Image: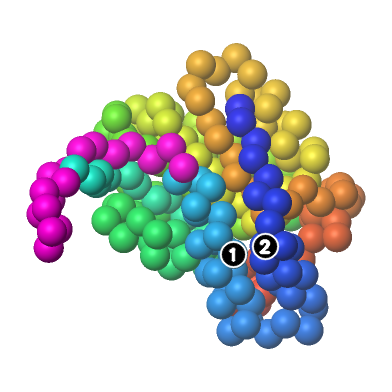
Amino acid sequence: MDVHVADHPLIAHKLTYLRDKRTDSPTFRRLAEELVTLLAYEATRDVRVEPFEIETPVASTTGIKLSNPKPIIVPILRAGLGMLDGMVKLLPSAEVGFLGMIRNEETLEVSTYANRLPDDLTGRQVFILDPMLATGGTLVMAIDYLTSKGARDITAVCLLAAPEGIRHLEEELSESDIPVKVVLGTIDEKLNEKGYIVPGLGDAGDRLYGVV
């Protein structure tokens, strides 16, 4: 597993305002979108391309375009939806699938309640969007599900991570031969007894969309 922390002052600046409990939902959504676009530059560094012949106003030249099959972006519902627009801005030709996953606040166990994905992901580059890598359970289950559909090139994009979640993910993937890249805005201090990232930013879904 390759973990990349995108160390950039603009990312740190936007994360600061995301963390602030005074930041309202509309501002939180805008900042999350902007942050994901910045992280997406790192996440797509190895996106597959192929040569593409064009004519400029001056001469013929060879450029590049995204290869087929198209990459697929998979936000984890519901909080991952707040990251989708920022990723699609950079990869407008990508397809979008969805995974609905929820964590039991008492047991911290993760369960899947919905999915909208192709039956076969063979040959596809998959980009998972989930704001928080806390315990790591959600991301482990998502990766297992995607690999069961044939995915062999997976990148996860998260705004924040806890060291415990990264360790859990590394342990679960240690015997896998499938390359997984994790792109993060930052690594925080720890998890608290409720499984929340500290200092974190609270419940990302609630802050994006309100309490439901």
Near mark 1 (Cα within 10 A), the count class, few <14, some 14-19 or many ≥20, is many
Q: Which mark is residue 35?
A: 1
**167 to the left or right of 88:** right
Quadrant where the N terminus lies? Answer: top right
Classify the position of the C terminus by image quarter. bottom right
Label 1 residue SS: helix
Q: Is residue 170 above or below residue 41?
A: above
Q: Nearer the viewer, residue 121 or 105?
A: 121
Asked if the residues shown at circle 2 and circle 1 are in contact, with their CB atoms under 8 angstroms apart, the answer is: yes
In this figure, which residue is indicated by the disc labeled 2? 11
Numbered disc 2: secondary structure:
helix
Give the CA separation, mark 2 to mark 1: 6 Å
The residue positioned 27% from the left and 33% from the top of the image is 120
Question: Is residue 126 shown in magenta?
Answer: no
Q: Which residues are magenta?
A: 45-61
The x and y percentages for residue 151 are 38, 31
In this view, the residue in front, 71 or 48, is 48
